[in-house]
Image: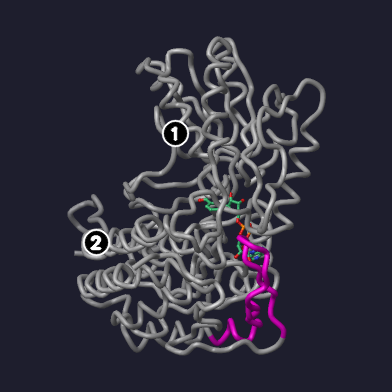
Amino acid sequence: MSLTFDPDRLPLPIGHWIGDRLIPASGEGLRMRRPSDGRAYADCPVASADLVDEAVATAQAALKTSNWGNLRPRERTNILHRWATLIEAEAETLAKVEALSSTRPVGQLVAGDVAVTAEQIRFFAEFADKEGGDLAPTDDGSLGLVMTEPYGVVGAITPWNFPLSMAGWKLGPALAAGNAVVLKPSEMTPFSTVLLAQLAVKAGLPAGLINIVLGDGPTTGAAITRHPGIAKVSFTGSTAAGSAIMADIARTGVKPMTLELGGKSPQIVFADADLDKAAAAIATSVLSNAGQACVAGSRLLVERSVADALLERIVGHMRAVRPGPTWNADTRYSPIISERQRDRIHAIVSASLTGSVECLTGGGPMDGDGYFYAPTLLDGVDQTSPAVMEEIFGPVLTVQRFDAEEEAMALADHPTYGLAAGLYTRDLSRALRLTRRLPAGTVWVNRYGRSRDHILPTGGYKRSGIGKDLGREAYLSNRRSKSVLIGL
Ligand code: NAD
């Protein structure tokens, strides 16, 4: 069966998911438009603080009645495995619902994001019966234990750029660790997350352990982060929203938080690199999802002697893209999420075209329906250019040339962000030496972008975030430790 679908005939689960009920919108919703053609197709319901309260109470009651946090851990693992299997069985439906609202082409979702989401849930499920506490080295008159236990109800907030896998990052470790979750997906892409939660109940997860409340940041998001019944907050989104959430939490109560925020990641190419491979990896990192990825390697730093040869190759990749609606199975190049975001990208590109800056390709919106923006290469920018300073979140690559390693290291060090970095060189000792010095939470060498090695944690330095998603760290951050000392 072809994955291509008719966007006007796709059933959507429009409503909040609390307990095991789909709760329809009450009051005015937020108008939603399809990024691929700009047409309005639904309104996103907005959960009030009262409804968030109901979701938190439902989660607390479900923890009590199911005893989820204190089950034999393997039972949690088994239920989460069944959920992952059901996600795979329903991959096409999930992919279509996700593709309709988001920038993710349906043809990339089934084997990509949906499969990865199922894998991540399985990956975290396996920690439940393998990660315990510690026996503390105390004297022989006592026995010291470090016990770990779940927090209770975790509040999660996710962005629009990879809705399903971002939900997997939050739900997988929180549930495996014995918590319940109240999750707010982005108001631009909420429905695939609702479907994901419905499948969990179908798979045997006790109802009420996952609750999905829809709405915007200031109303619904803030009601989650401020809620006294939310014991921990796990957020992925922009640095601006992350700062607002931190301030909110500081004002309304102290609780731990994981913040996965924005990036402006450098890719550094030395003259000894394999230029064909480097060009392909660099282009993919800014063309995939049209650059709407936190780790997009949007700043190219290239050794002067190979700059022209590398840029020629990257321009070739950029000019080869063909836009298409996300509901066509053969589409590879994504639209921008909204008209507003496309205008913002264009404003930053235009403001950066000063002095000797040259636009080698692209530089504007693409013709036709939808919010497509042409892949854009800005050569000769300096460190103060808006295109270098700001996270553009679009298919825009800036180019800065360097002559010496030290110069490259200075340019790589962004004043605000430290999410990821890429290094291309055949010199192993240089790669390892510079990896140590790069101020970033992830460094990729002679490749760029996340793999399916979910054991590698992801998270930022500087204002790119606090804490980690993925890896053992994400699981452990969903449990707190209790010290016990027993007199013998
Ligand atoms: P955003 O910050 O606008 O919104 C993210 C989520 O936060 C949405 O659900 C939104 O409704 C909610 N929100 C906004 N303000 C809030 C507030 N004051 N209180 C509570 N919730 C609030 O981000 P976006 O535009 O959806 O996503 C793009 C951003 O996400 C980029 O900056 C990108 O780098 C970042 N991101 C980071 C990672 C990572 O792993 N570091 C991964 C994906 C995306």
Residue at image position (31%, 83%) is 67
As drawn, is 110 to the left or to the right of 215?
left
Depth check, front residue: 474 or 342: 342
As drawn, is 476 to the left or to the right of 376?
left
Residue 304 place in picture, x, y as percent: 58, 12
When the figure is inspected, residue 275 is found, relative to residue 77, above or below; the finding is above
Counting labels gives 2
The kind of residue tagged 2 is Glu
Distance CA(mark 1)–CA(mark 2): 26 Å
When the figure is inspected, residue 129 is found, relative to residue 260, above or below; the finding is below
Q: Quarter-wise, where is residue 70 in the image?
A: bottom left
Residue at image position (72%, 42%) is 364
The C terminus: image quadrant:
bottom left
Q: Is mark 1 within 8 Å of ligand 1?
A: no
State which tag comes first along the sequence, 1 or 2: 2
Magenta range is 28-54
The N terminus: image quadrant:
bottom left
For mark 2, what is the residue? 126
Residue 35 place in picture, x, y as percent: 62, 61
Question: Is residue 340 inside the magenta stretch?
Answer: no
When the figure is inspected, residue 364 is found, relative to residue 85, above or below; the finding is above
- The circle on residue 209 is none
Depth check, front residue: 160 or 317: 317
The kind of residue tagged 1 is Val
Q: Secondary structure at mark 2?
A: loop
Depth check, front residue: 233 or 34: 34
For mark 1, what is the residue? 443
Quarter, ligand 1? bottom right
As drawn, is 435 to the left or to the right of 383?
left
Whether residue 145 is visible here, answered yes or no, is no
Q: Secondary structure at mark 1?
A: strand
Residue 259 place in picture, x, y as percent: 54, 54
